[in-house]
Amino acid sequence: MREYETRVRVRYAETDQMGVVYYANYFVWMELGRTELCRSAGIRYKDMEMGDGIFLAVAEASCRYSCPARYDEEVVIRTRIAEFRTRTVRFEYEMRSGEDGRKLAAGSTLHVFCGEDMRPLRLPEKYWGFFGVG
Amino acid sequence: MREYETRVRVRYAETDQMGVVYYANYFVWMELGRTELCRSAGIRYKDMEMGDGIFLAVAEASCRYSCPARYDEEVVIRTRIAEFRTRTVRFEYEMRSGEDGRKLAAGSTLHVFCGEDMRPLRLPEKYWGFFGVG
Amino acid sequence: MREYETRVRVRYAETDQMGVVYYANYFVWMELGRTELCRSAGIRYKDMEMGDGIFLAVAEASCRYSCPARYDEEVVIRTRIAEFRTRTVRFEYEMRSGEDGRKLAAGSTLHVFCGEDMRPLRLPEKYWGFFGVG
Amino acid sequence: MREYETRVRVRYAETDQMGVVYYANYFVWMELGRTELCRSAGIRYKDMEMGDGIFLAVAEASCRYSCPARYDEEVVIRTRIAEFRTRTVRFEYEMRSGEDGRKLAAGSTLHVFCGEDMRPLRLPEKYWGFFGVG
């Protein structure tokens, strides 16, 4: 299955008054991880949306936090496709510090392929290869 | 000219590691101020977008910060229409603490009326009354 | 166990180009839910942090999305304390539309009580009552 | 005066239902611009905060929007120090598309140097060189 590693630097805007990254922002990083995983496979998610009217609606999202990420720290996001079906896809993510390698968090998102009307659909075959099938 | 006061409570997500509200979030509060000003005048901004395909694209935005807002504090946003033309509208905002009345910030946004293609247009007359004209 | 209902209106800033609320923002609403649950029980989370130096670090967070929330829609967040131990607390959330009652999402967060050094600690007894114990 | 160019790719989270980047997010990009300008000059803003307890509190912020930025687009942020005094510093920013070079926005922020108590102070001389003085 596909796997890809991307890097992001913690923004001031992403911290909160606890002095660490606000917990919802890890889900934004997961989005970056899957966007870059797609790009690495030659697919721009943007083109799936714009060209074919296919959206990846989020059905489930979860995250376990191990160690807080801090402002200006580099975060390495490792994203992989954990499960692909013609109607759904699950991504898994691991986030580590790019500086000392400590594990920050791990998460998962489940997506349903939808049309522009937000109704579930079967992913067209031309995209299957990207998800490691066929 | 129309004027309206709305209240918002500072979210944890809106703070940063300086222990105060991150500066970009005041612009989100301004958006709340103008949404509620519209609603108070019997117009749902949502309906302008959905029904008539009219968008208020932001052309300029500015804010002067007087005193930092803090987590869980209530903020009073006073919004007024400062200038209306058939192609543009300017809102002004004053933000104060709902607890001790101290001035937090003051700002302004200038908007251009646009169609769904994001091209500028002349606001249909039926909306003029809302902006205090006719 | 304690339970509380609070309401929030969807901000424009919370939507994304799919025309619905961006998935990470539901976690911000969960934060509002637990803040207001605390307030309803006579505790300001702010005072726990400021006064006693006790933080609720997030250890796990998850959400299942049923139906997308849309701009300007009112969302009813029902929050309850699902499990309390002296070192951890789990909140559960249900989010429904305030307009047609349809279920939008359900989620859960697990928190670890920490001191200012971000190390886990045992919650002081004076707070137990709030969590429905003693 | 110092000048620096940094690049950022538009996140899905940064768009709104108008299909373009939400206006408050340009101020987050400005923050990235000044952080990277500092880094390019051998100063980590993080170290100023952590080491010397010096904060750059925002006193004013403004932005003029020329053309909307879109999801997945690369944005080039050109940041320069427009004015330095021992108690304040003004940054200016220009944001262009990294793809077709069109101008997206231009902005400015004015900052006051503050101590940990959030009171204004005179910037220690050791930092002056960074701002192009001495």
Image (tube, coloured by chain):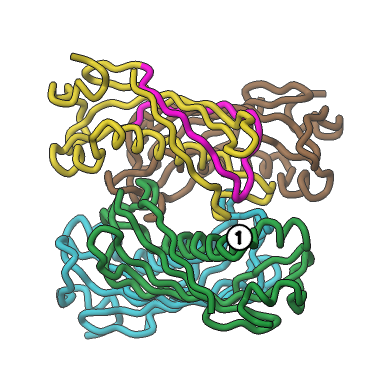
Chain colours: A green, B brown, C cyan, D yellow
Q: Quadrant of residue D125?
A: top left
Q: How far across and how far down the image is residue C41, in percent?
A: 34, 70
Q: Which residues are magenta?
A: D58-82
Relative to D58, residue A102 above or below = below
Relative to A27, residue A126 above or below = below
Q: How far across and how far down the image is residue D55, in percent?
A: 24, 35
Would residue C44 appear left or right of D128 to someone viewing this image? right
Report if residue C27 is visible in the image.
yes
In this rendering, the count of numbered labels is 1
Q: Quadrant of residue C47?
A: bottom left
The answer for which chain carries disc 1 is C
Q: How far across and how far down the image is residue C80, in percent?
A: 42, 78
Please name the residue shown 32% across and 27% down the image: D111
Please name the residue shown 21% across and 26% down the image: D120
| Element type at mark 1 | loop
Residue B92 lies within the magenta run:
no
Q: Quadrant of residue D23?
A: top right
Please name the residue shown 56% across and 78% down the image: A90
